[in-house]
Image (tube, helix red, strand yellow):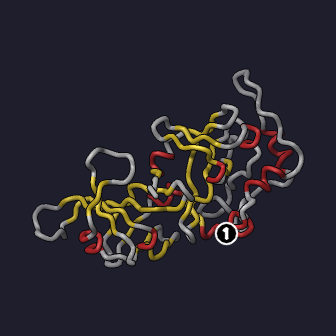
Amino acid sequence: MIQSLLSADALLRCRLLTLDGAVAGLTDLILDTEGWRVRFLAADVRQWAPDRDALVTPRLVADVDEASGVVSLDLTAADLAATPPLAVRNGIAGFDEAGVVVPPNWREHWRARIQPEGGVDAPPAPAEGGEVAADLFADVDLDPERISAAQLVRAETLRGMRTETADGTVLRIQDLLIDDRDWSLAHLDLLLAADRGTRGGGDAKPLRCLLTPSGIDWLNTEAGTLYLSVWVQELRDAPTRPLPVAGNDGVKVRVLEPAA
């Protein structure tokens, strides 16, 4: 089976498109660090909620067209407006310890916030009941009450963290490569801008490598550091292969496969 990988960098330049043609911004990806997969997409729905983003689970993504910069959703504009809002309180991903912060009487909350702009009618208010919310978290492992703030991290936050190998070499996370089958993290795209330890000596050269989540030791959110379980020499010795996502022709990286 051919594995198709999505670039977080490319995704975050895309716009979200609903079934009825409404457009929203994609502001971030929120990852679960326990399973290393994307749990939510954060949507900018400023036309309905100027002060916060809305949450969409990846299983509501119908199609991703990186070339056109469009992520199509299996939702109408009204459904998107009714999705649970991303909290603005404590927590790495904007969650508090109870999970997703949904205001009391949240459907009434959305009705009050809908403001037509530019002469275009706002989407109709959602129907009474909890159909949309129930559908969003129909899977047991997506139950917000079972997800704590401690295990969630924004993609943008993760990409800005200091990343260290087991022997203390610091690398930079260039990108996150996402498996589009289940939205799991397939690879960290890592860069050591000036590697002076390459065998054979010579001038310092950039070392670029792809590392699977099995190479992650632990994430220290307080220190803002992602610790890897591999040594830098393992990355240097990894086999070199073409980059498995859209990029410059001929670009190759070292791919460290997990131990069999």
Q: Nearer the viewer, residue 32 or 119?
A: 32
Residue found at x 39% / y 78%: 260
Is 92 drawn above or below residue 133 in the view shown? below
Residue beneath disc 1:
148
Residue found at x 66% / y 37%: 18
Q: Is residue 48 left or right of residue 162?
A: right
Q: Is residue 86 left or right of residue 26?
A: right
In the picture as drawn, the residue positioned furthest to the top comes out as 119
Residue found at x 67% / y 40%: 45
| Residue 75 location, quadrant | top right
Q: Position of residue 174 (x, y in %)?
A: 38, 55
Residue found at x 54% / y 56%: 181
Q: Nearer the viewer, residue 162 or 135?
A: 135
In the picture as drawn, the residue positioned furthest to the front comes out as 1
Is 179 drawn above or below residue 66 in the view shown? below
Q: Position of residue 6 (x, y in %)?
A: 47, 51
Q: Is residue 186 left or right of residue 70?
A: left
Q: Position of residue 92 (x, y in %)?
A: 59, 63
Amino acid type, mark 1: Ser
Label 1 sits on a secondary structure element that is loop
Count of marks, rendered view: 1
In the picture as drawn, the residue positioned furthest to the right comes out as 128
Q: Position of residue 251 (x, y in %)?
A: 27, 50
